[in-house]
Amino acid sequence: MTASKNHLIIVESPTKAKTITKFLGPKSPYTVFASVGHVRDLPKSNKKAIDIAGGFIPYYEISADKTEVVAELRQLAKKSQEILLATDPDREGEAIAWHISELLDGDCEKTKRVVFHEITKSAIDEAIKNPRPIDQNLRIAQEARRVLDRLVGYDLSGLIWRKVRYGLSAGRVQSPALRILMEKEREIKKFKAETFWTIAAEMLTKNNEKITLNCAEEPRDEKLVKNIIELGNTGNWIVTEVKAQEVKRSPRAPFTTSTLQQTASSRFGFAPSRTMRAAQKLYEAGHITYMRTDSTNLSQEAIGHIQETIISEFGKELLQTRVYKTTSKNAQEAHEAIRPSNFSEKSAGSTDDQHKVFSLIRQRTLASQMIDAALLKTKITANITAGKIPNFSINGTHIINPGWLLADPSARNNEVDLPKVSPNEHLKLEKIYSQEKQTLPPPRYTEAGLVKELEKRGIGRPSTYASIINTIVERGYVSKEGRTLIPTDTGEVVSTFLETNFTNYISDSFTAEMENELDEIANGRRDYKKTLEDFYGPFTKDIEAKANIEKITNLGEADKSMKCPVCGSSMIIKLGRNGKFLSCAKYPDCAGARTIDGKELAGPKETGEKCPDCKDGKQVEKEGRFGKFIACSNYPKCKYIKNSENNQNSSGVTCPVCKKGELIERRGRFGIFYSCSNYPKCKYAVKARPTGRNCAYQRETGICGALMIEGTKTIPERCSDKTCPNHNPHKLKHQAIGRWPAQPTQQRADR
């Protein structure tokens, strides 16, 4: 007989809920419900978001897509004798738990907080036995971060809109990250390449084994290169030294968030966000411990399991228990390092990405508790008997005892085995040659490199690294070429403006110190209101002091060879929506323009029709990132855009919001999407082509009714509402999270 479900556990993720339900078993009195992330947030309008005069009190509202979730939560809470808030074990998780508690209006005796760092049966049972109140210090620290980010973002962005260009933005953490990239970019631009030569000599040993040695010097003078080659060709070569040394190579500490992102990037080419998506799923499925941490600690229980696994798989002689000191000076909360929850699992995850990330975590964790690898490093040095040229040498490495490399074979470096030679042994020169090269500028940051740099400078926290990079890329401040991050023209202008006018607020020291103050709030050693007052008072004065600076319309003079294609005048560099371009110096009297490369830009062409919206403007043909379009000449006051008369891109589906327009295909920054033809009056949009059918999934509040959209080969159709379980129909038959019975859509049943 199934137990009465009169106890409620609330988590953020449906996957996490499903995993916990599996461990609790069918006879458990607990219903596990997923809030699907945050349920409340600050409103988009900054006017009512924060009561500054009242002490920086934030005003929260239920997110538009969470009204049904909150309604279901409240119904379940009324029926429950006990409510356990089991959100993630960090500040953000604490904040989500508090928001849910506030919305449920539950009494403190009924609503408790439970925390576990891995989703296993023993961890869940232990957490349920030891509930606690919500940690208000952690919650307030997260609130302070959210309020700070909003105040900085809105005030700085507002000034940038007025002084640089409408639609640009700044942020408390994203702007320092952009500055770091720009500093590197300026180094690269200042770099002057120098010519140098490498010299190599191919030799034969007395046993006719081939060996290639490289000159110890890389001359800048071609005459010196020719002299070395001439002497090398005429001289007699001998081995001058053979130096062999045994060295130890120690394993690295178990993964933190930062080191996991860096290693996944170097081995698999994963972006930090991709790594974290895979790690998040692994954690929610119970395969690894919590993946947002800057601690390298391992629990004693975990070390015991690791030792058993090493003895079983590699032998007792390879075991060496190690304790790693956490290097991050800002280590958050008492987390463990990222490790497997069950070491008997050699593989885990439902996707290729998850398999790779899990194997990486398991290998690193096991290797961290094994003996050093022993390597023999050999260096052979040779020269002509006259000794009038620089030494030539080659280095080799041979593994004597692999040690921890057995657990983490991908960490092996390529071995170079050298032939056996002795000092004073003669070598036969086969060929000596040079190669002209150019010195290279310092490399740009990769995503993994930027994560490492942010951690080193104390900017951000484990939970924010991936989102920082996503933000500066999505806002067009940085572009990605492979794994390399390159600031765009827009990013350069915004960063330069901030560096010139708000140096202090985007400096390493200020950003890192603010993170320290947030840590002190979390530890109960600092007051929320005073922290924000100390920051916001001087900050607003600095913003006000810049109110009258000139608007940045001119980024400098263009090359004198570039003349206006219309009037022949000189040109200046300006910033447009698509980056830098050349504008006639006589603008607005002359509208001549060129691309930054000098190609002529045709200006807006009138169509002869008036704007149907404002009645005052004229319809003009413009050219944007995705081709030509017709809009009002009064933009941005009037945002009329004429729909294409070519209906090939129309889905034929009526907009479910305004009931007037049709959903048409458009192309944006992230690819194709479908939105209402009445945009911008109606802003309804979906990410895939609508099928014209409505979702018939029976939710607790009634039929879903949202539009169905095309899916994939394996999931031909899905609900467009992300909060509807039918958004992931392939998971419905496996649903077991204590919410409601899974039901297929009527449309799929009809098929």
Image: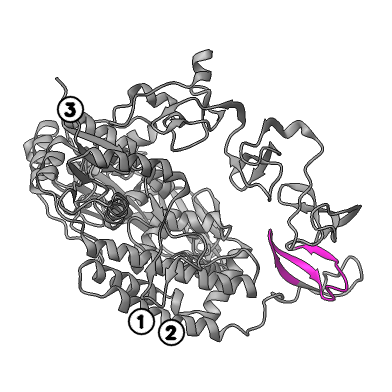
The amino acid marked with disc number 3 is Gly
**Picture layout, residue 97 above or below residue 78:** below
Front-lying residue, 649 or 329: 649
**Picture layout, residue 226 above or below residue 305:** below
Residue 195's x, y, as percent? 57, 65
The amino acid marked with disc number 2 is Pro
Q: Give the range drawn in magenta.
A: 573-595
The amino acid marked with disc number 1 is Asp
Front-lying residue, 106 or 242: 106
Circles 3 and 2, Cβ within 8 Å, touching? The answer is no
Would you call the spot at circle 2 few (<14 residues within 10 Å), some (14-19), or many (20 or more)? few
Q: Name the residue under label 3.
A: 25
Q: In which quarter of the image is residue 67?
A: top left
Q: Mark 2 points at which residue?
A: 538
Q: In which quarter of the image is residue 527?
A: bottom left
Q: Name the residue under label 1.
A: 534
Q: Which residue is drawn at 20% across and 43% down?
A: 118
Residue 326's x, y, as percent? 20, 60
Circles 2 and 1, Cβ within 8 Å, touching? The answer is yes
Per the image, label 1 sits on a secondary structure element best described as helix
Residue 580: within the magenta? Answer: yes
Q: In this view, does 96 lie to the left or right of 466?
A: left
Precedes in sequence: disc 3 or disc 2: 3
Q: Which residue lies furthest to the front in this view?
A: 78
